[in-house]
Amino acid sequence: MASLIQSDKSIIGDVSKAKVVSKKKPWRDLDLSLKIHPIRKDIIPLKDDVAIKNAVKNLLITNFFERPFQPALGANLKALLFEPADYVTRIDMRQGIVDVLTKYEPRIDLLKVEIKDLADQNAYNIIVFFRIKEYDTEDKVEIILRRLK
């Protein structure tokens, strides 16, 4: 009978809670506010989940034909600002958000999109809830689209 070696161990109990841990890929993005680092005198980059959140926000505020050689990139929300503030417009906004995030942002899983009509302010409050796949965390991006008179 072979003796039990110290490294021979088995998992006992509920294995559904076990996770595979691996090295996460670092994500970096350019901060569009262009804040300068006080010591290095260089632009401070956004890292990891903040970079992904910034990319989601940039996709939401981009209109069609704004980026060269990518005319279909964007949610085209600004074009819907001057449409009637009704249920059909909110459906178009939601569909544009879902389409752009599922097509151009593979790092997230879209959970929910909330669109509130702020009629007294001539604006829409849009909140997008998502899960970052690599970090297994939930986050949200909130933007306010405002009609200027």
Image (spheres, rainbow, N blue to C red):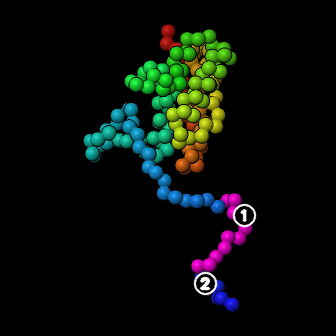
Circle 1 sits in a helix, a strand or a loop, which is it? loop
> Magenta region: which residues?
7-17
Q: Position of residue 64 (x, y in %)?
A: 48, 20
Identify residue for label 1.
14
| Magenta stretch: includes residue 135 | no
* Along the line of sight, the residue nearer the viewer: 89 or 68: 68
Of badges 1 and 2, the one in the foreground is 2
Identify residue for label 2.
5
Circle 2 sits in a helix, a strand or a loop, which is it? loop
On the question of residue 117 being in view, the answer is no
| Magenta stretch: includes residue 15 | yes
Report the magenta stretch's main SS: loop
| Kind of residue at disc 1 | Asp
Which residue is pictured at 60% across the width and 40% down the height?
109
Above or below, comparing residue 16 to residue 105 in the picture:
below
* Along the line of sight, the residue nearer the viewer: 142 or 4: 4
